[in-house]
Amino acid sequence: MHIPVLRGRAREQQTIADLQAAATDGVGGALLLHGDLGGGKTALLRHAAATAPTGTVHLWATGLEEESDLPYAGLQSLLQPVFERIAELPAHQARALTRALSGEGCPADDRLALSMAVLTLLATLGREHPVLCCVDDADALDRPSLDAIAFTARRVRAHRVTLLLTSTAELPLNGVPPLPLRPLDPQSGRAMLADLLDNPGVDEEPRMWSVRAVDSGDDVLAALAALGGGNPRALTDLAASLSDSQLAGEAPLPTRLPADSALLRTYRARLDRLPPDTRWLLLLAAADEETDAAGLMRAAHSSGVDIAALAPAERGGLVRVSRGGIVFPQPIARALAYEEAPLAQRRAAHLHLAQVLDADTERLRRAVHLAAAAHGPDAELAEELEEAATGGGYSRASAALEHAAQLTTEPGGAAGRLVTAARYAWQSGSAGRARSLLRRARPAARDRVVAAESEVLSGEIELRAGATANAAESLLTIADRLAGSQRELAVLALMRAGEAVCFSGDYPRYADVASRAAALRRPDDPPDLEVVFEHIAGFAYTFGGRHHRAIRPLQRVVELGAALDTAAPLTCASAAALLLADDVGAHRLAARAVEVARESGDVSALPLALEMTAYAEYWLGRYDAAAATSLHGLRAARACGQGNYAGDHQAMLAVLAAIRGDREQALRHIRDIEVAPGTGQTNRPKALSQWALAVLDLIAGRPADTVARIAAIACPVTGRGHIVVQAMATPWLVEAAVRADDREQAVAALAGFDLWASSTGDPVRRALSARCHALLAPRGSAEAEEHFQQALALHLAGEADFEQARTELLYGQELRRARRPRDAREHLHRALETFTQLDAPAWADQARAELRAAGEAVDAPAVRAADVLTAQQLQIARLVCDGATNREVAAQLFLSPRTVDHHMRNIFARLNIRSRIELAKALT
């Protein structure tokens, strides 16, 4: 049987799978999945049924509004397949249940007996086989059925029963854990669309993407994913509606769900049932995304409508009112509420909202509503929008400038406003919208300044979300063309070109960037230009191996970035501090860049600022913090459409997982990396991934593979590749090369690392350098010992505990092999203690193995009961620790004493214990 992939629902699937596994072992459970219409609740139930253990009894019911006033209709549907088993119940329970299901009702005095009958029936079935009960749309069930099912759900723990319920709203079912279904994240939405286009359905042929569509496929998927708002049903309807010309990129993509969309029909039917006052309030809320509850109440009051009229829309799942504002569950719900209203009524809503907004404190929102109600071009209103946009957030400002462009008759002026709107859209995190606005502006952008701004912005978007290698070339060309007339824009283009070169690993081209920047520099440049020039100069010196010449410009970048205190200069300053090995300063500057970006709403600056933060945390030895930061960066990059930087963060997560020795997680992160075509053969995510794989190879005892991977990250002859990533990985390369007896490779790699480490004076990098020299020295020599001692002394001045422990481990290995086991054990003990504290079991195991080889008996790590026992075994163990006998445990869990005896033997074996006293210790 084919089991479809459910994108973006791993957490929910795992939760359900855990419930089913526990139920199979005798510990039942229930779960309420709640979320918006079309959110995939039914798909999760079907997946649970498809993946249930062999022999599972399946019971299914769906709540229907048409039957919500028929008592016990839902229960009758659920239990219909097992009617014949009712006769096995105790007589009173059987009578109560039979009467209820046959339509005779249930007296109040028998309600407990009826509910107990349902529970007993499921428990009886569970003694033979695991039971899976799925109740879809439970909020549409008749109340008596829901009450009986909820009673059962709260009491299935002692039985082999899994009970899953779904609802649009969170039902108040006390004792039943709720699990909200969030909208799919953009990446999962794109992946689901790709699945649907490749395999649309059983009876349809796959939709083949044309050559032209492949080039724009990411944009197509991103645009459709945004339109679908993370709703699986909406994405399914959108994919099914695409024509071949839309797939080929020859026709515009849809801007709303197709008219025959099942989800649209459901929402429209609910909307049509609403009274006029409710429709009016929904229209007011839909016309202004920033309307909060207080604002809507003011607008309702001034139009003579009671706010209570909104209640039917809330009950129908069309809107939610929270402290934060008015929330439409899906963009299509907002769009329907707005677009289904007549044009005159929409205009009236905008005018009414403009009237209730304060002209001073809410100038931009008011101007946007006036623009939406305008009959045609209006130069005065366009200027008002442009002026008001400077005081709003980037998203609001972008919408305002787009409105202003529509009100502008002169094509050049309209193009200028569209380009500014695109810049604001990019900064607000809407890469797709920014691209769309730039495409609209391009035909009319005859003004040289406007055209230049458009090209530089397009290059910036391309380098972070598209073909980075192409972006570098186009940005250098743009910089050359603008050098004589638009110097500031030319400098910005060079900065972005350098960024593209660094990402794609084409470092020899950085010299071209630096020479062009030097030609544009002037003695009286303001700080915001000076920081760019110094940044380019410092990086060029570093990449050329002239580290001592790089120090002064990099220090100046740190000074200027801190003084300017805006996101981009602060991020540049953090990168400069990293090259200077001032990791604490780099972390402080990057954290400030993140803070400033969030305060200003410049979402586009977050991925790179968070990347610098993660690198600083790596060098400081704060691997857990670096992983958390990289995860935040991954989410931020995906949310704002910066797929290339999402790849950076995903790859850094792989490196950190590999260093911890978590092979499975590292490989998962590598598999999940997605970067756009044209990012270069040696792009940064690929280089970081090779580093991660190299670490895994070293841990697995394949040092030659480690050497090959890290050596391939960059070529020392041509300078192509990721020399910065290779420098970070050099200590791993040296260690592997020594193990693989490839000292020539190690010496060559270490020479460049030594230049950098010595130029910075940083104790951590110098400690790593000394450790590498110790490994290269003759085994057992005074030279090796001197370098190891130097490394340990330097480690004491740094913060990298993990690297210090690795040095202790390597020194211990050296001493043991030099037949000095007593001295070795001292260092190996310290290594083991640190690795244990840092939760690095792979490295702790190596330290234990070395200690044993050094002649010391080392206990195996303690086994955690939760890691080795099944859910039922854990439950039995806890009952036994509470003092229950095997027979008492059997009675409480509806098992035979023989089965409990069998479980106890397995529990003792898995925990390597012999008595109940030891069991109590193992559980505590």
Image (cartoon, rainbow, N blue to C red):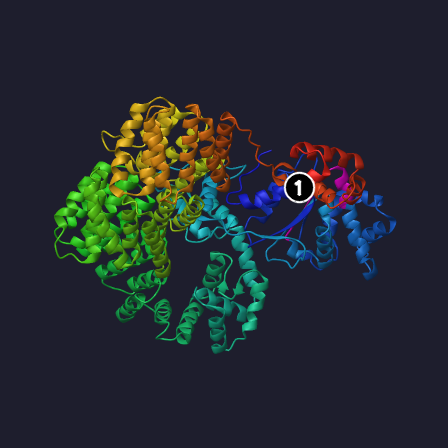
Secondary structure category for the residue under label 1: helix
Q: Foreground residue, 474 or 573?
A: 573
Magenta span of residues: 122-137
Point out the image quarter for the N terminus: top right
Point out the image quarter for the C terminus: top right
- The location of residue 719, given as percent across then percent down, is 24, 33
- Three-letter code, disc 1: Lys
- Could you tell me which residue is drawn at 70 percent across and 57 percent down? 142
Q: Foreground residue, 306 or 766?
A: 766
Q: Is residue 508 above or below residue 260?
A: above
Q: Foreground residue, 196 or 636?
A: 636
Find the residue positioned furthest to the right.
Answer: 91
- Could you tell me which residue is drawn at 81 percent across and 40 percent down? 887
Q: Which residue is mark 1?
A: 921
- The location of residue 113, given as percent across then percent down, is 82, 54
Q: Is residue 249 above or below residue 811?
A: below
Direction from residue 517 to residue 100 in the image, left or right: right
- The location of residue 531, given as percent across then percent down, is 22, 53
- The location of residue 255, given as percent across then percent down, is 41, 53
Q: Where is residue 122, by image quadrant?
A: top right
Q: Where is residue 721, by image quadrant?
A: top left
Direction from residue 598 to residue 102 in the image, left or right: right
- Could you tell me which residue is drawn at 46 percent across and 43 percent down? 193
Q: Could you tell me if residue 730 is visible in this image? A: no
Q: Is residue 104 above or below residue 838?
A: below
